[in-house]
Image (cartoon, rainbow, N blue to C red):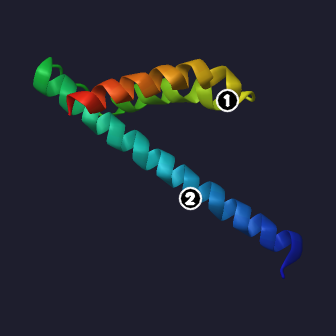
Amino acid sequence: TLGRFGQAIVDFFLVLTQWGFCCGYMIFLSQNLATVLEEHLKITLPMYYPVLIFVFLVTPPSILKNVQRLSPLSFIADIIWLIGFGFV
């Protein structure tokens, strides 16, 4: 009922929500990586190093316009997931 303004507001909050999810996910992964490095390899890093590692790993695939280029990687990830699920 608010026309273009309402659509812009909804789009803004959708982007803001997704951005928050991504930030939370990056922090979760970074904390887990830091814990693994500290517990198993006895390496202590500042928290922003693991965050930067994941940002540089996740950003290039997210820029791709043609998602079909990722299908071989997705297939490999599914196989690795199944192997890991088999261990559990």
Classed neighbour count for the residue bearing mark 2: other residues with Cα under 10 Å, few (<14), some (14–19), many (≥20): few
Quadrant in the picture for the C terminus: top left
Disc 1 is placed on an element classified as helix
User: To which quarter of the image does residue 84 belong?
Assistant: top left
Taking 39 as reference, is 15 left or right? Answer: right
Please determine whether, in this image, residue 57 is positioned above or below residue 24: above
Q: Residue at x 29, y 33 (%)?
A: 85
Please determine whether, in this image, residue 54 is positioned above or below residue 10: above
Taking 9 as reference, is 72 left or right? Answer: left
> Which residue is disc 2 drawn over?
17
User: To which quarter of the image does residue 50 belong?
Assistant: top left
Q: Residue at x 69, y 61 (%)?
A: 12
5 or 69, nearer to the observer: 69
Decide if residue 44 is in sight here: no
Decide if residue 37 is in sight here: yes
> Which residue is disc 1 drawn over?
63
49 or 83, nearer to the observer: 83
Query: In the rendered structure, which amino acid carries the disc numbered 2?
Result: Thr
Q: Residue at x 11, y 26 (%)?
A: 39
Number of marks in picture? 2
